[in-house]
Amino acid sequence: MSDPLEAQFSAEFAALYHNRRTIALHIRLVDAWILLSQLQLALRHSENTGPSAERARHIAKQLQAIVAPSGALAIVAERGWDAQHDVPRAEPGP
């Protein structure tokens, strides 16, 4: 690791990883839904794998349980994990 920034980042990230402190994130439920949908999209990327992706999936599932515990929201949220349920974008007009 010859890059000083990379070495500093690695040390600081290791400290974050071992820190057990938690934070409270106060956001509107609709914003949690938006965050969930963005995480779902990112996590469906074929190269988004590994421990960070698994941790993000766990966080996204926690958000899903909060914002979409039942009903149509739950069905649509679960579909968000599957690209076959994506809604195609309308083609821009001339």
Image: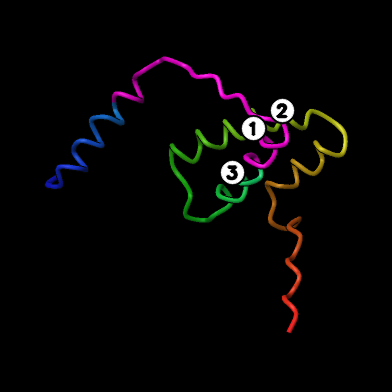
Image quadrant holding the C terminus, namely bottom right
- Image coordinates for residue 11, horizontal then vertical, percent: 23, 30
Q: Is residue 75 above or below residue 90?
A: above
Q: Is residue 27 above or below residue 24?
A: below
Residue at image position (57%, 24%) is: 25
Mark 2 and 1 residues: CB-CB less than 8 Å, in contact? yes
- The span from disc 2 to disc 1 (Cα, nearest Å) is 6 Å
Instruction: Return the residue at label 2.
Output: 65
**Mark 1 → mark 3, Cα distance in angstroms:** 10 Å
Q: Secondary structure at mark 1?
A: helix
Q: Position of residue 73 (x, y in %)?
A: 82, 38
Residue at the farthest bottom position: 94
Dot placed on the residue nearer the N-terminal end, 2 or 3: 3
In magenta segment, residue 55: no
Residue 61: image tag: 1
For image coordinates 47% across by 46% down, the residue present is 49
Q: Residues within 10 Å of mark 2 (few under 14, many from 20)?
A: few
Residue 68 drawn at (x, y percent)? 77, 32
Judged from this view, the residue extending furthest toward the top is 21
Q: Where are the magenta residues, as a range?
A: 15-36
**Secondary structure under the numbered disc 2 in the rendered image:** helix
